Amino acid sequence: MHGILSTIINFIVVYLPPMAANGAPVVFMHKRRGRPLDFGLKWIDGRRLLGDGKTIEGALIYMATGVVVSSIISLILYNNIYIKVIVTGAVASAGALMGDIVESFLKRRIGLPRGAPLPLADQLDFYIGANLALLACNYCIKPVLSSYVAGVVLIPILHVVTNKLAFKLGFKKVPW
Ligand code: CTP
Ligand code: MG
């Protein structure tokens, strides 16, 4: 069993970058109309591949945030540029981005328009993606069981709270 402090450090190193990355496009893209990641293409069901909520600019902001946040974590926790921490943050963020994109693809396939809520999937899409990417990355720092469990419990709660806040601040048109 991991001690509480090492669990918190593990959680910060492994999950904070993808969490920040997941929230960044909402903050930076709410006033801009980005270029849709699916180039406006439609699937065989006649609906958009991903929809206008997934943009190229958003994806770049997503990855940049993951790298910047993990670099800051490396500097604060290790007083140094610790490549393993930064790679872990980048890989987790890339996986999170993939999870977010796959979820939009699935939402469009079941006929949900952009921005429509899909409880639990909306909250955990990026978390599942981040975990799968970390699982596949041999070089990365892995989540310990207790931080993984903390993520499952905390992330949906945090997601609801931060989305309500983003709505109040005018970053989102809907409170979810
Ligand atoms: N966003 C973006 N590019 C991304 C991810 C997010 O531009 N790759 C921006 C969009 O402005 C999006 C907002 O962040 O509307 C919130 O993201 P999210 O909740 O994931 O998208 P939704 O608009 O809810 O669309 P979807 O139904 O496809 O999830
Ligand atoms: Mg959404």
Image (cartoon, rainbow, N blue to C red):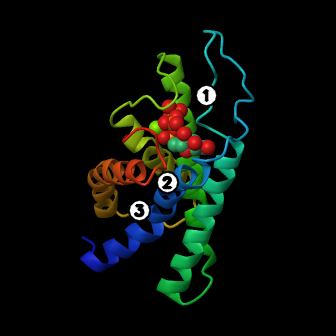
Q: What residue is at 56 percent from the left and 27 percent from the top?
A: 105
Label 1 beta carbon less than 8 Å to ligand 1: yes
Q: What residue type is disc 2 on?
A: Gly
Closer to the N terminus: mark 3 or mark 1?
Answer: 1
Q: Characterize the local packing of mark 1: few (<14), some (14-19) or many (20 or more) Cα atoms within 10 angstroms.
A: many
Q: Is residue 60 above or below residue 53?
A: below
Residue 136: x and y, percent?
Answer: 56, 51
* Left or right side of 80 for 168: left
Amino acid type of the residue tagged 1 in the rendering: Gly
Q: Tell me if residue 6 can be seen.
A: yes
View extreme (top): residue: 45
Which residue is the site of mark 2? 23
Neighbours of disc 3 within 10 Å: few (<14), some (14-19), many (20+) = many
Image point (55%, 78%), residue name: 72
User: CA separation, marks 2 and 1?
Assistant: 18 Å
Q: Earlier in the sequence, mark 2 or mark 1?
A: 2
Q: Is residue 49 left or right of residue 22?
A: right
Mark 2 CB lies closer than 8 A to ligand 1: no
Image x and y of residue 150, in percent: 28, 59
Residue 175 sits in which quadrant?
Answer: top left
Q: Nearer the viewer, residue 69 or 149?
A: 69
Q: Disc 2 on helix, strand or loop?
A: helix
**Which of 154 and 58 lies nearest the eye of the viewer?**
58
* Side of 136 where 147 appears, left or right: left
Three-letter amino acid code at disc 3? Answer: Pro
Mark 3 → mark 1, Cα distance in angstroms: 32 Å
Circle number at residue 143: 3
- The structure residue drawn at horizontal position 54% and vertical position 55%, both measured from the top left corner, is 27
For marks 3 and 1, give the one nearer the viewer.
1
What label sits on residue 51 in the rendered view? Answer: 1
As rendered, which of 11 and 168 lies closer to the eye?
168
Quadrant of the image containing the N terminus: bottom left
